[in-house]
Image: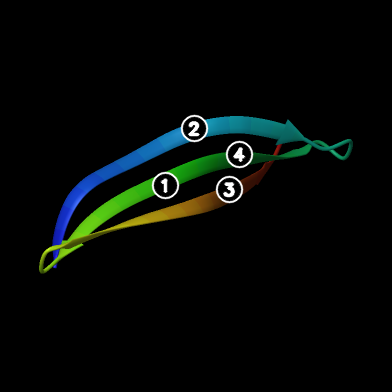
């Protein structure tokens, strides 16, 4: 398996009324397995407090 492309994109920050927020990211990965290419898409949530 060979990783062809990766891309991490910051999407948005979602605030909550209690002072916390969540950052949303997209992770895109394209891999090659033999002669086939596969594309994976992940959403990553990162939370924090103020």
Residue at (48, 43) in percent of width and height: 26
Q: Of the residues under marks 2 and 4, which one precedes in the sequence?
A: 2
Q: Position of residue 4 (x, y in %)?
A: 17, 49
Q: CA distance from mark 4 to mark 1?
A: 13 Å
Asked whether the residues under the numbered discs 4 and 1 touch, taking CB atoms below 8 Å apart as contact, a structural biologist would say no
**Circle 3: element type:** strand
Instruction: Give the crowd class for mark 1: few <14, some 14-19, many >=20 residues within 10 Å.
Output: some
Asked whether the residues under the numbered discs 4 and 3 touch, taking CB atoms below 8 Å apart as contact, a structural biologist would say yes
Foreground tag (4 vs 1): 1
Q: Nearer the viewer, residue 39 or 9?
A: 39
Give the residue pinned by disc 2: 10
Q: Position of residue 7 (x, y in %)?
A: 33, 40
Asked whether the residues under the numbered discs 2 and 4 touch, taking CB atoms below 8 Å apart as contact, a structural biologist would say yes
Q: Of the residues under marks 3 and 2, which one precedes in the sequence?
A: 2
Give the residue pinned by disc 3: 46
Give the residue pinned by disc 1: 27
């Amino acid at each position: 398996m060979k990783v062809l492309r990766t891309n991490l994109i910051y999407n948005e920050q979602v605030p909550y009324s209690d002072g916390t927020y969540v950052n949303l990211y997209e992770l895109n990965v394209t891999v090659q397995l033999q002669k086939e290419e596969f594309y994976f898409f992940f959403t990553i949530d990162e939370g924090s407090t103020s």
